[in-house]
Amino acid sequence: MIIEVSDLHKSFGKNEVLAGIDCSVDESEVVCVIGPSGSGKSTLLRCLNLLEEITSGEVVIDGSSLTDRRIRIDDVRAEIGMVFQQFNLFPHKTVIENIMLAPMKVRDLNRESARARGKALLEKVGLAEKENAYPGSLSGGQQQRVAIARALAMEPKIMLFDEPTSSLDPELVGEVLAVMKDLAQEGMTMVVVTHEMGFAREVGDRVLFLDGGVLVEQGPPEKIFDDPQEERTRAFLNKVL
Ligand code: ADP
Ligand code: MG
């Protein structure tokens, strides 16, 4: 297990947003997280790389417990790439500069190696010709692919995606999902919060249904989508499918 979450609680003030989550993710597994808005999906992802402080419980990433004071948070974080709904690219830097930045700063990669790695990643996401473009001149789908390349430049062991296609025009969703599918097929460990049920069904090894801060049900996609056991899962799927 590369991710192990035990009895994870997260509260904001009196508002308990995660009410005891137990789940784990295997190496090379693709886990899709679905559930209604406000159910705690983003908070769960953010707890996995300590963008949120854990209220109680435990998260173990690749053998390191995030609540252990002896671990170096930045080391753990460097193993985890994150892609958000908003692309968060630096607007005044070119595409390649956006990708080169973190490896040079955090991994001490020299400029030439960082550039070579960046070019290879742009090739991989189908944007080799956009190396010197500025983010503002790209479509949303292209910007999100750059954001994925940027996360990959750190050579993470795990990639977390929080609704990566939710802000895209419908015709641009496919190109981003295709890049994610390639990544999954190469064996990347991925946790993907998504409303793209087709993607979850096709690419996901396992689907987690969250509602009200509780992991209501989990299982292989065909089980969750075609034969859900819980009434809450059925009600949600009836609305979105
Ligand atoms: P989802 O991603 O499933 O839509 P979130 O994890 O974003 O849900 O949010 C779950 C709940 O936690 C919501 O009620 C939200 O208002 C609350 N919440 C999330 N982040 C914060 C925060 N930083 N401060 C206070 N409340 C928050
Ligand atoms: Mg969210």
Image (cartoon, rainbow, N blue to C red):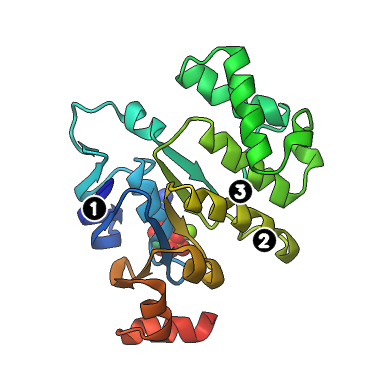
Among the 4 quarters of the image, the one containing residue 21:
bottom left
Does 129 sit left or right of 62 as displayed? right
Please give the name of the residue rendered at 61% of the width and 35% of the height, measured from the top-left corner. Answer: 121
Mark 2 or mark 3, which is nearer to you?
2
Does 176 sit left or right of 57 as displayed? right
Tell me, yes or no, if residue 211 can be seen here: no
Quarter the C terminus occupies: bottom right
Q: Which residue lies under the disc numbered 3?
A: 86
Relative depth, front residue between 12 and 34: 34
Q: How packed is label 2: few (under 14 Cα within 10 Å), some, or many (20 or more)?
A: some
Among the 4 quarters of the image, the one containing residue 159:
top left
Q: How packed is label 1: few (under 14 Cα within 10 Å), some, or many (20 or more)?
A: many
For label 3, the SS is loop
Residues at discs 2 and 1 in contact (Cβ within 8 Å): no
Above or below residue 74? Residue 43 is below
Q: Earlier in the sequence, mark 2 or mark 3?
A: 3
Could you tell me residue 25's position as x and y percent?
A: 30, 54
Q: Which residue lies under the disc numbered 1?
A: 5
The mark found on residue 72 in the picture is: none
Does 81 sit left or right of 22 as displayed? right
Q: Earlier in the sequence, mark 1 or mark 3?
A: 1
Please give the name of the residue rendered at 81% of the width and 40% of the height, measured from the top-left corner. Answer: 137
Does 168 sit left or right of 138 as displayed? left
State the separation of the CA atoms marked 2 and 3: 17 Å
For label 2, the SS is helix
Q: Does the Cβ of the disc 3 residue fall within 8 Å of ligand 2?
A: no
Could you tell me residue 182's position as x and y percent?
A: 56, 51
Above or below residue 189? Residue 70 is above
